[in-house]
Image (cartoon, rainbow, N blue to C red):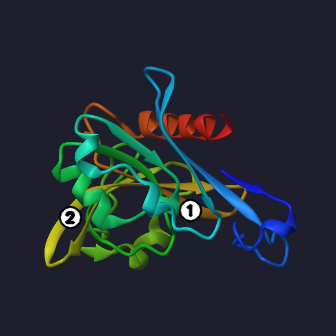
Amino acid sequence: SSFALHDALAHVFPGRFSAVLPAAVELHCTLDLLQDAPLTISLSPDTDSEHEYCPAPESLRGDLLMADRGYLNLAYLREIDRHGGHFLVRAKSGLNPRVISAFYENGNLMKSCQDRDLQAIVSKCPKRQRAELEVEWLIDGEPFRSRLIVRWNPETKCFDYLLSNLSQHKYPIDTLCLGYKLRWQVELL
């Protein structure tokens, strides 16, 4: 979460939006939701990258990282996956992974969407139901696969995306979307 400060602190805590908020801080907090307790709390200038405050991938073994799109870093997510951790992250609209498979929420196959880049097929995604895609990137020459949930946002009139490595059988689309809403509740804390 970002908070504005008195303008006189801009030299110590510069804000991202210097014309509007010359001074601002960002509060980074890693919470253990099951214990209802913070694990780490950091205060930084609002101009610092969020990535510097992410938990180490090896510390997330058996745990779930929920994060907003500012924290999206594919190499970091791959490392979480390699260390036995899980992630549920809102993805940026400009992502363009290779689509391995694509299904409507009702389970029907999205025809002509396999083995194509996401941006080439995004217009085929439905607005009345969500879609589940298995996608792949090449990171440092190695494939990295994950789930990508595509859903239409009627308020913004554009698609938004959730990226996860949680099991499709244990965590269907509806569960992932409900789970991500919990991240917003944490943000409000």
The residue shown at (30%, 57%) is: 77
User: How far across and how far down the image is residue 14, in percent?
Assistant: 71, 71
Q: Please identify the quadrant where the C terminus is shown.
A: top right
Describe the element under mark 1 as helix, strand or loop.
strand
Instruction: Name the foreground residue: 61 vs 127.
Output: 61
Please, what is the three-letter code of the amino acid marked with disc 2? Phe
The residue shown at (18%, 77%) is: 140
Q: Is residue 14 above or below residue 52?
A: below
The residue shown at (33%, 65%) is: 74
Q: Is residue 115 above or below residue 129?
A: below
Query: Which residue occupies the extreme left position in the image?
Result: 142
Q: Which residue is mark 1?
A: 159
Q: Nearer the viewer, mark 2 or mark 1?
A: 2
Instruction: Name the foreground residue: 156 vs 65.
Output: 65
User: How far across and how far down the image is residue 165, in percent?
Assistant: 28, 48
- Alpha-carbon distance for marks 2 and 1? 23 Å
Q: Is residue 27 above or below residue 171?
A: below
Instruction: Name the foreground residue: 68 vs 42.
Output: 42
User: How far across and how far down the image is residue 121, in percent?
Assistant: 40, 73
Q: Which label is found at residue 140?
A: none
Q: Quadrant of residue 135?
A: bottom left
Q: Quadrant of residue 47?
A: bottom right
Q: Which label is found at residue 144?
A: 2
User: How far across and how far down the image is residue 29, in percent?
Assistant: 53, 43
Query: Which residue occupies the extreme top position in the image?
Result: 35
